[in-house]
Image: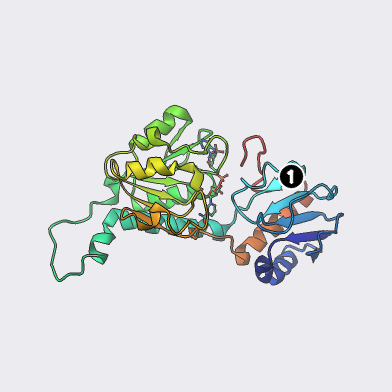
Amino acid sequence: MKIIFAGTDDHWSHYQTTLPAAFKRAEINASITRDLDTHDADYIVFAPNGPLSDFTPYTKTKAVLNLWAGVETIVGNATLTQPLVRMIDHGLTQGMVEWVSAHSLRYHVGMDAHIHGQDGTWRNTSWPTLAETRRVTVLGMGALGTACAQALRSIGFPVTGWSRTQKTIDGINCLSGDAGLDQALRTADILVLLLPLTDETNNLLDAEKLALLPDGAFLLNPGRGPLIDDEALLAALDKNIAHATLDVFNTEPLPTDHPYWAHRQVTVTPHIASVTRAATAADAIARNIVRIENGETPIGLVDRTAGY
Ligand code: NDP
């Protein structure tokens, strides 16, 4: 079996040992090359910021295995006729669960008041409410959104999840569709965005939708920057939104002079909410190759029509 690794040098420095080790564990007998002229490759392990953009020559390739969860920069590539598989991996999911839980708890227990209030004044007149009184909404109930929703539920937050198709998930109030979105936003004391970027989700959080959030709402966006209308969010920070923690942006890196950097109600994190870690992702890639070789559907097969 021939496999092209079409990632950056940095990716390769992590995968050149982990991938062969994962293949060995999965009993896959494969040669891995970075030579893009290997037109008879069985699989392509692909990073959107790597060297490959024209998939036309790879007529024998059974699948393109994306190293990232997000596929918005490749799903519309007209030369890509091979099945596209996005990354679903324990390490990626766990990293996101930790980031979302940490930033939700920062808001919930009011950590900032104490971190920034070390002025010698003993203020013990108010206590955090319990999580059961703070409603969380997660938009996007896929691999990451579902895991985050369940983690937040296990802490005690009442959690509503919104997705394109209707779901039933134990302990989560699952909503879908346009009416479901309005309802999900109206009850979001903390709103978490874990939607993929598609034609439907682009600018979804515009002025009208942001206005539905309760007064004093908190917003976490580890999904994609264009999910939010930036101007509308900046305006909403003067109205009903108390604070936003943003990990992803319309332009990355976020330009130095962008108003988000200096805004007292915004925390910028530099697209680090989670990352595909070779240590666990190599096994996810190997497992999907085994599935395809056995005639099974790979985990994370992208629906081109839906765009994710
Ligand atoms: P999934 O594809 O597993 O889940 C996507 C979810 O969004 C699904 O529940 C889907 O609904 C829902 N959805 C998609 N379109 C719509 C729509 N139009 N209306 C309502 N719901 C919709 O993705 P992941 O959970 O793996 O990842 C989510 C995103 O997180 C990625 O696309 C990426 O942008 C971002 N990400 C960010 C990282 C970071 O470090 N900041 C790291 C990794 C990912 P349904 O279930 O019905 O299909």
Answer whether residue 136 is visible to the viewer in this image: no
In the image, residue 221 sits, relative to residue 202, either above or below, namely below
In the image, residue 56 sits, relative to residue 127, either above or below, namely above
State yes or no: Cβ of the residue under disc 1 lies below 8 Å from any atom of ligand 1. Answer: no
The N terminus, quarter of image: bottom right
User: What SS does tag 1 mark?
Assistant: loop
Residue 106 image point, x, y percent: 32, 58
The C terminus, quarter of image: top right
Residue 108 image point, x, y percent: 29, 53
In the image, residue 38 sits, relative to residue 70, either above or below, namely below
Left or right of residue 191, residue 279 in this image: right
Q: Quadrant of ligand 1?
A: top right
Q: State the residue in front, 127 or 169.
A: 127
Residue 100 image point, x, y percent: 42, 54
Q: Quadrant of residue 279?
A: bottom right
Q: Which residue is mark 1?
A: 83
Q: State the residue in front, 296 or 190.
A: 190
The residue lying furthest to the top in this view is 179
Q: Quadrant of residue 228?
A: top left
What residue is rendered at 14% in x and 62% in y?
Answer: 124
What residue is rendered at 73% in x and 46% in y?
Answer: 296
Left or right of residue 128, residue 166 in this image: right
Q: How is the image coloured?
A: rainbow
Residue 27 image point, x, y percent: 77, 63
